[in-house]
Image (spheres, grey):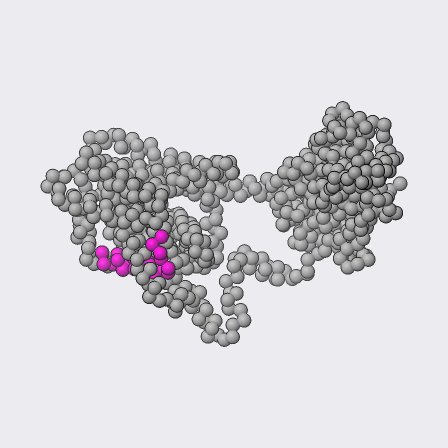
Amino acid sequence: MSASYPEDVQSSEPGFTSATPSTFESVRSSGQLESMPPPQQQSQPQTQTQTQPPSLPPLPPHSDQNNEGTRSKRRRGKANVANESPNPSQSEEQGTEAQSPYPPMGVNSTTTVNKIQSELPMSVVSSPLEIHNVRLPPRRSTSQKLRQRLSDIFFPDDPLHRFKNQPSWLVKLMLGVQCMFPIFQWGPTYNLSLFRSDVISGLTIASLAIPQGISYAKLANLPPIIGLYSSFVPPLIYSLLGSSKHLGVGPVSIASLVMGSMLSETVSYTQDPILYLKLAFTATFFAGVFQSSLGILRLGFVIDFLSKATLVGFMAGAAIIVSLQQLKGLLGIVHFTSKMQIIPVLASVFKQKEEWSWQTIVLGFGFLAFLLITRHISLRKPNLFWVSAAAPLASVILSTILVFLLRNKAHGIAIIGELPKGLNPPSSNMLFFSGPYLALAIKTGIVTGILSLTEGIAVGRTFAALKNYQVDGNKEMMAIGIMNIAGSCSSCYVTTGSFSRSAVNYNAGAQTAVSNIIMASAVLVTLLFLMPLFYYTPNVVLAAIIITAVIGLIDYQASYKLWKVDKLDFLACMCSFFGVLFISVPLGLSIAVAISVFKILLHVSRPNTLVLGNIPGTTIFHNVNQYREALRIPSFLILAVESPIYFANSTYLQERILRWVREEEEHIKANNGSKLECIILDMTAVTAIDTSGIDTLCELRKMLEKRSLQLVLANPVGSVMEKLHQSNILDSFGLKGVYLTVAEAVADISSSWKAQP
C-alpha cells in the first residue's frame, strides 16, 4: 500500500510500508507484451516466496555442468507460463520475432509473451519491495518561506557569510571595508615582485589604450581627446572598487558605436557639437546610475536576458557596420553618410568616388595589412602577444612621422590636428536633467550601460576562470557604474572592461589591478606632455586600428557551433545579426533581447513531456527514445514533465497528456495489446506548481476517471507536495495516488490488480 502522507498511513516501520509486489516481468506476462524482449536471465530455484523484485538480473553464460538443471528449471518456467498464458500453443512460433517496442501489426502478441516468458524464471529469491511514504516538507511560516525565497533570489552567493561568527565588531568593520574596496584585501600582501609584473603589463596595455582611446572616441563621434580622458579617470576608480585582477578598463568599440549611432539620429555632432557632447556625458551618467543600481539592488539577472547566442549575432553585425563606417577614413571620403545600415553605407562609399584619395588608400591599407599580420602572429604564437599589443602605437608613431615628413606633398591625407594638453576638465556643469533631449540621454545610457556591463563582466569572469579566482558580479556592476558616474563628471564617456586590453594585460603577466593604475599614469604623462606629438597623426591609421580591433568580434566558429547544437539559438543569432545590418544598431539590440525573452517564454509555456520505460535489470525508468533498451510496461503509460507547472503551460500540458493517452489507446487497439488502465505522471523535474497547475491536475484526473483510467503521481518534490496537500487535491487521489518512485507505483498497483478476483 502506498502512502501519501506520514500522518495518513500506518506503516510497520518509520518512513515506509512493506509490500510484496510482482515484478515488472510478471506485469508483462499478465497481458500482451508491448516491449522488446528482456535480455536472457539466470534461472533461480523455486521457493515458497511469492514476492519478486522489480526486474531480473542478467543471465550469465550457461556452463556444460549445469545444463540439465537449467533445462528442468526452464521446463518448470514453461509450465508456469502455460498456466497463465491464454494461447501457449503458438509460443514456439512467434517468440523470436518480438524485436520492436510493440508487436508487429496482425500478430497475436500473446504468443510473443509465451515464448519470451518461457526463457525466464517465474519466481526469484528476493526481499519484498518497500513502498515508501511520500512525506511533506517541514512546516514553515509564511515569513520564513518569504525570507528564504528572497534570499535565494537576491543573495544566492550569501555575501554576508564572511561576517558570521566573527569575534568583534572591529573585525567585521575591516571585512566590510575589504568588501567595499577589494584593494584592501590584496594590498597588505603586495610586494615588489608583484609591482614589477604590474608595471610591465600596465605599460604594455597603455601602448594599446592610447591609440584605441583616440580611435574609439571618433567612432562615437566625439573629439579624440575624450577617448584619452576616458582612459585615465575610470581605470583609477576601478582599481579601487573592482574585483578582477586582469580587467583592462577603457572605451570599447560596441558601446562607442551604439552611443554614436543613437545620439547622431537626433543631434548632429557637426552642426551642434556642444549639445552632442552634453548628451554623451549625460548618457554616461545615466549608464553609471543604471549599472550601480543593478549591483546595489542585486538585479544582475537583468543582463542575462542578452543570451550568448544573440550577443554573438549582435557583435558580428556591429563589427561589420563599424568596419564599413571606417571606409570613410580608409578611402579619404569627406562627405559620408551618418546612417548605420549596410545599404546606405555602401551606397555612400560608391557615390563619393570622386573624393577617394589614392595617398590615403595606400597609407591606410598598408597599415591595415601590418596590423592584421601582427594580430595573426599573436594568435598563432601567444608568447608573442606583445607584437599585436605594440602594433597600434607603432603604427601611430610611424604614420605620424611619415605624414610629417611628407606634409608638403600629402595634402589629401586628413590628420587629427591639435589636441589640448592637460588633465580632464570637470564636466558636471554639462550634465542636464531636463529638456527635450533628456529621454534620449536616458535611453542611450541604459542601452550602452547594458552592453558595456555585459561585456565587462563576461571578460572579467573569463580571465578569472583562467587563474582560478572568483569575480563578484554585483561588485563589478557597482564598480563599473561608479566609475562611469565619476567619468561623466570628468569629461569621460561610457567605459568598461575591454577584451583586447584585458587579453594583453593577462598575457603580459598582470597580477593585480595596479596594472590599471600604471596604464592611467602613462595616459596622464601623455595628456600632460605628449599631446602636441599627435598633431600629424592621420585619421586613416585610426580607422585601420578600429577595423583590426573589431574584426575579432566576428566569431564564425561560435555561429557554426550554435547551428550544430541548437537551431533555435542559431535563429536568434541570425535575427540579431541581420537586424543590426539592415535595420539599425539599437533596433538590432532590441530584436536580440526580444528573441531571448521569446525563447524563455517558449521553454516555459511549451515544456517537454516524455514517455518512460524500464531499463532492464534496474528499477530505473527513462525516456524510451533516448534509451532504446527501455521497456514499456503493459497497461501503464508513464509520462514525465520536465518543467514547473504554471498558468503559462498548464493548458498545454493537459492537452499534451491527453494526446499521449489517445495515441497510446489507438496503438494498443491497432496491435491488440493489453488495455490501458493507469497513467503515471513522473513529477521529479516539476520543481514548482501554482494554483492553475493544481486545477489542471484535478481536471485531468476527472477526465481520465470518466475513461476508467487511473492517474498516479510519482515523486513530487517538497514544495509541490506541500501545495498539493494544502489544496486538498490529494484526498481525491487516495492512498494509491501518490508514490515516491515510478518503480514503486508500478509494483504496488500491479500487485493490487493481481489481488483482485
Q: Could you tell me residue 745's position as x and y percent?
A: 75, 46
Q: Was residue 194 drawn as part of the magenta stretch in this picture?
A: no
Is residue 217 in sight in this rendering?
no
Q: Residue at x 66, y 36 (%)?
A: 628
Residue toward you, 150 or 60: 60
Res 41 → quadrant:
top right
Q: Residue at x 31, y 39 (%)?
A: 323
Q: Could you tell me residue 362's position as x and y percent?
A: 21, 36
Is residue 665 rendered to the left or right of residue 534? right
Q: Could you tell me residue 253's position as x and y percent?
A: 33, 46
- Read off the magenta span: 507-526
Is residue 418 rendered to the left or right of residue 520? left
Res 337 → quadrant:
top left
Residue toward you, 552 or 583: 552
Tally of numbered discs: 0
| Outermost residue, left side | 408
Is residue 226 rendered to the left or right of residue 79? left
User: In which quadrant will I find the C terminus?
Assistant: top right
Image: 210 above or below 107: below
| Outermost residue, front side | 65
Q: Residue at x 16, y 38 (%)?
A: 412
Is residue 515 in sight in this rendering?
yes
Image: 539 above or below 347: below
Q: Was residue 523 drawn as part of the magenta stretch in this picture?
A: yes
